[in-house]
Image: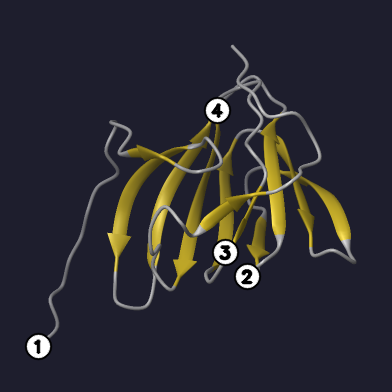
């Protein structure tokens, strides 16, 4: 019989993602995981790409912009509550908080995050840094 699990989102930050956003762990399974992320007001993530995983992002609150590029197609998308997007393997991406509240979102990662070597830095659209 399968183990039935549940978890409530914690207040404490569990780790910092390679792009600089705050991560709170939710649930991890054999084939994927779901985590909660926060980017503070005025902050811009580092630009990265992934070696082997793909992700689906769903924005919960705040306002921001997401840059994605596969080398031939590039876009900047306004993000906020209700926006869902994908990050295919190898796509370069960067995001920033353009609002006055934290930018919060869920990320489903498939397969589960393999470790620190998964993400690698790339040239991005904006200078990375944290606002106040």
- Label 2 belongs to which residue? 89
Tell me which label, 3 or 1, sits earlier in the chain.
1
**Circles 4 and 3 in contact, beta carbons < 8 Å:** no
Residue shown at 49%/56% (left/top)?
107
Which disc is residue 102 wearing?
4
Tell me which label, 3 or 2, sits earlier in the chain.
3
**Element type at marker 3?**
strand
Real-space Cα separation, disc 4 to disc 1, in angstroms: 40 Å
Real-space Cα separation, disc 1 to disc 2, in angstroms: 33 Å
The residue nearer to you, when weighing 86 against 19, is 19
Q: Is residue 49 above or below residue 12?
A: below
Real-space Cα separation, disc 2 to disc 4, in angstroms: 27 Å
Residue shown at 67%/44% (left/top)?
47
Residue 91 in percent (x, y) is at: 71, 63
- Label 3 belongs to which residue? 56
Tell me which label, 2 or 4, sits earlier in the chain.
2
Q: Furthest residue to the top?
A: 132
């Amino acid at each position: 019989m399968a183990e039935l699990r549940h978890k409530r989102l914690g207040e404490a930050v569990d780790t910092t993602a390679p792009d600089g956003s705050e991560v709170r762990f939710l649930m991890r399974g054999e084939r994927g995981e779901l985590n909660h992320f926060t980017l503070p007001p005025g902050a811009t993530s580092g630009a990265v790409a992934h070696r082997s995983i793909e992700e689906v992002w769903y924005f919960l609150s705040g306002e921001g912009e997401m840059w994605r590029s596969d080398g031939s197609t590039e876009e900047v998308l306004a993000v906020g509550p209700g926006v869902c997007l994908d990050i295919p393997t190898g796509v370069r991406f960067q995001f920033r908080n353009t609002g006055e509240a934290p930018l919060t979102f869920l990320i489903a990662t498939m397969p589960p995050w393999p470790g620190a070597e998964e993400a690698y830095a790339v040239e991005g659209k904006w200078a990375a840094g944290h606002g106040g």
